[in-house]
Amino acid sequence: MPKLPLTPIRTGGKPTRASDHMLEVDGLCFEVLRSERRRTLQITVERTGALRIVAPPQVEDRQLIDFVEEKLLWIHTKIEEKSRLQQRAPIKDFVDGEGFLYLGKSYRLRLVEKQLVDLTLRNGRFCLRQASVRRGREIFMRWYAYRAQGWFERQVAEHANRMGVIVNEVNVQDLGYRWGSFGTGGRVSFHWKAILLPPRIAQYVVVHELAHGLHPDHSPKFWIKVEQHLPDWRSRKTWLAENGIQVEGI
Ligand SMILES: [Zn+2]
């Protein structure tokens, strides 16, 4: 049987695949997804530890099992990595002095008695109204989403033309375990948490998603497009895989 290349874990992409069935191999449970567009098999270990196989429609279970068995060591290493990273995810208490990320920098929180709005960032400090602490998470989320909208709109405007991608709409929302996605009708979406990443990493997310406007899969053509615009995309991608979890705990 010819060996199929193993594609690395995805950052985002199009959720256009239909869930097929579950497949158990060596005590591990895989969700099998079929895609007309796929030519090769792909295994992903999600940040939650969930396992997926994406396969072309005609590939039989026996082949999937062979493929998984061949990759077991890689899969177990990834699962271990993910659970280690998951444990490091910080949980916020919204107390004085606690650090909050914004574009890769950590700003300390100060709880203030009197303030017209719930949250501001001034003089290098996040100032949260004492009376609003209980809604802290929601307030931070809204603040991040608002800032993310402007930042990602500017980034998309800067990169889309150069990359030859037509974008009609930029959205910021909770995308679950994806940093971004490129949808139909030229609609590009970003997770509001992406605004916590350092600018050069968030920029990689932008270029990555824009490249999906031309190539929906993570094909060699896709990575060539990414490389044309970000020659050092590899180090940014690695950084995101290793450190992205730091922005998880808000
Ligand atoms: Zn992608």
Image (cartoon, helix red, strand yellow):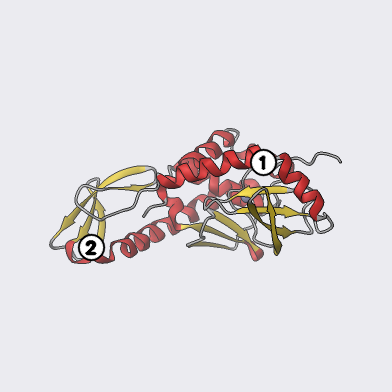
- The circle drawn on residue 2 is none
Residue 224 vs residue 243, the one in the foreground: 243
Estimate how packed mark 1 is, as few (under 14), some (14 to 19) or many (20 or more) residues with alpha carbons within 10 Å.
some
- Residue drawn at (58%, 48%) of the image: 11
Estimate how packed mark 2 is, as few (under 14), some (14 to 19) or many (20 or more) residues with alpha carbons within 10 Å.
some
Residue 175 vs residue 162, the one in the foreground: 175
Residue 58 vs residue 144, the one in the foreground: 58
- Residue drawn at (51%, 60%) of the image: 175
- Residue drawn at (64%, 50%) of the image: 27
Residue named by callout 2: 133
Dot 1 amino acid type: Leu
Toward the left, the furthest residue is 113
Which structural element holds mark 1? Answer: helix
Residue 204 lies, in percent from the top left, at 54, 43
Residue 107 lies, in percent from the top left, at 28, 46
Q: Is residue 8 above or below residue 49?
A: above
Circle 1/circle 2 CB separation < 8 Å: no
Residue named by callout 1: 72
How far apart are the alpha carbons under marks 1 and 2?
46 Å
Q: Give the quadrant of the C terminus.
A: bottom left
Foreground mark, 1 or 2, reads 1
**Could you tell whether 127 is left or right of 188 in the image?**
left
